[in-house]
Image (tube, helix red, strand yellow):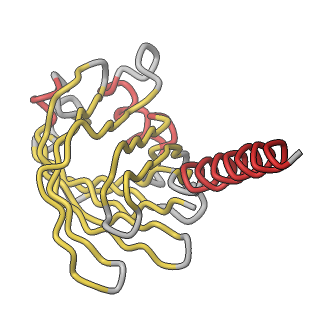
Amino acid sequence: MNSNIKMFKRVFGFMLLLVFTSHSIQAQQFNLVNKESTLTVLGTSSLHDWHLTAEQQSGKIVFKSLEAGEIESCTINIVAESLKSGKSSMDKNTYKALNTSSHKNISFQLTSVKETVNKGNGKFVIKAEGNLSISGVKKSIPLEFSLSIVDGKITLTGEKKIKMTDFKIDPPTALLGTITTGDDITIKFSTIYK
């Protein structure tokens, strides 16, 4: 009888451990909140500066240790045709340049974290690398961003300069080539996960 009680305590204790462990593992994963996240592409042309804003984003972030800001994996996916400028003619040129009929999404997938600097109060600076895929071309890029963890809300903020031609994108032109777009663009993001 006594050995049965001991066995029950062990099994019960093990089951409790499993429940708490699985809960803490699940608590380490967060989903991107589209309505609260912003991603803007900034560029130049021979006529004026321009910008595009992403209206449809999704993704996940998983932590090895939330308290230490140790990221295990991170993904961001953008529906390419959700990039909007407010001008339909520019949007059409953008989608043509991005070949959105064949490549529906733009994505970023973290491949490694090089350095995590703890700034205190749930704030970190992360130096990382990841694969950026645009218009069917995938490139590994370095990326530095700020990470903030407050009340179960994860915020990634930063910006990255890239060249369109690095992704085999011909910078769009308009009016028979009289308006040309600069090759350099800047991607600014404030990505919220909950």
State which quadrant residue 80 falls in. top left
Left or right of residue 50: residue 7 = right
Q: Nearer the viewer, residue 24 or 44?
A: 24
| Residue 69: image location, x then y, percent | 32, 64
At horizontal 70% and vertical 47% (from top left) the residue drawn is 10
| Residue that extends furthest to the top in the rendered view of this protein | 102
- The quadrant of the picture occupied by the N terminus is top right
| Residue that extends furthest to the bottom in the rendered view of this protein | 121
Q: Nearer the viewer, residue 77 or 122?
A: 122
Left or right of residue 72: residue 104 = right
> Is residue 44 visible in the rendered structure shown here?
no
| Residue 178: image location, x then y, percent | 15, 38
| Vertical position of residue 188 compared to residue 97: above or below | below
Left or right of residue 139: residue 65 = right
At horizontal 55% and vertical 45% (from top left) the residue drawn is 56
Q: Nearer the viewer, residue 49 or 101?
A: 101
| Residue 39: image location, x then y, percent | 39, 56
At horizontal 36% and vertical 79% (from top left) the residue drawn is 122
